Amino acid sequence: MDNAPSDPRAGLAPERALVPRHVAIVMDGNGRWARKRFMPRVYGHKVGVDALVRIVQSCADRGIEHLSVFAFSSENWKRPSDEVSGLMSLVLVAVSKYLAKLAGDGVRIRIVGDRSIVSDKLRAAWQEAEEATAHNTRITLSVAFNYGGRWDVVQACRKIVEAGTPADQIDEALLASHMAMSYAPDPDLFIRTGGEIRISNFMLWQTAYSELYFTHCLWPDFGNTELDAALAAYARRDRRFGEVRDSEPMLAAALPADS
Ligand code: IPE
Ligand code: IPE
Ligand code: MG
């Protein structure tokens, strides 16, 4: 096709390409977004789902292959019960509202996290979402729900032990292959909205060499302008993976100048 856009990664090793293959997002700030509008926190989560559906499309349009989002952490059970039950109901509403659209748009949905302690209804909705989109290849959306980076390492270790693997055969590659998102490359770009500068137990193993990007933007307000700002910051980063590179470290690119 003559008019097809040229591949932005052509000629580059995948981890050095200007467009990330895998973007991970901690979608934080829904509660504050709602409180600013004198609305219940669950309303912020509802508008946050709409923002996610838009961002999946935007990521696919920009050639990103994997988008992984933190939707509910292992620690979020500590929230008030009405917020937790509101979030569970919201997943069911979101699946019925958006599944057909996402499936039609070529999005593959995968759910990662501990499913053992969620309701049968929720498990069934996730299974439906995964099955309805299993053949899609445009972009993979991994939704981390009842997920924690520490849980992920523990469940991987358990599988390895259960398989009777001798200790001297355990290496990084084997552990990585048992992690919940082993089907995806490690995230190139890790974004957290909402202004907090922390990981909060998302993808601890896989983010060892991710580029980190934090923004004050609250998740429901995160749109194409904010996504493109994050991608532009990523494109300016000098990923070194512990090597000495030809270019001198460009500290100014990663840190704001002291003022
Ligand atoms: C993130 O938004 C979504 C979930 C944790 C489910 P928050 O609910 O944490 O929103 P803030 O951080 O309180 O504003
Ligand atoms: C992280 O946000 C979890 C999700 C976005 C799902 P939190 O709001 O739970 O994180 P903390 O409590 O500020 O660290
Ligand atoms: Mg929060």
Image: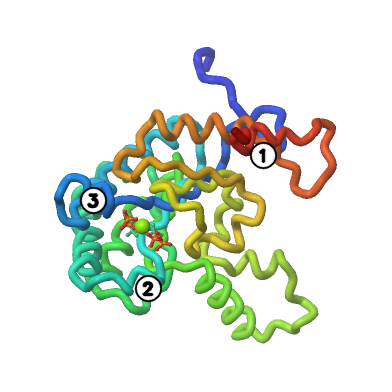
Residue 194: horizontal and vertical position, in percent?
39, 48
Question: Helix, strand, or loop for circle 2?
Answer: loop
Q: Residues within 10 Å of mark 1 (few under 14, many from 20)?
A: some
Residue toward you, 65 or 53:
53
Q: In the image, what residue occupies the spot 40% across and 66% down?
A: 73
Residue 14: horizontal and vertical position, in percent?
67, 39
C-alpha gap between disc 3 and disc 2 = 24 Å
Q: In the image, what residue occupies the spot 47% across and 62% down?
A: 200
Question: Going by the image, does 153 lie left or right of 53?
Answer: right
Disc 3 Cβ-to-ligand 1 distance below 8 Å: yes
Colour approach in the figure: rainbow
Q: In the image, what residue occupies the spot 41% across and 46% down?
A: 193
Q: Residues within 10 Å of mark 2 (few under 14, many from 20)?
A: some
Q: In the image, what residue occupies the spot 61% across and 31% down?
A: 235
Task: Check disc 2 and give the amino acid type.
Answer: Arg
Residue toward you, 216 or 258:
258
Task: Check disc 1 and give the amino acid type.
Answer: Pro
- Which residue is identified by label 3? 44
Residue 130 in sight in this render: no
C-alpha gap between disc 1 and disc 3 = 36 Å
Residue 187: horizontal and vertical position, in percent?
57, 49
Question: Helix, strand, or loop for circle 1?
Answer: helix
Taking the view exactly as shown, the residue that stands out farthest to the top is 2
Measured along the vertical axis of the image, is residue 225 above or below residue 194? above
- Which residue is identified by label 2? 115
- The tag earlier along the polypeptide, 3 or 2, is 3
* Labelled pair 3, 2 in contact (Cβ < 8 Å): no
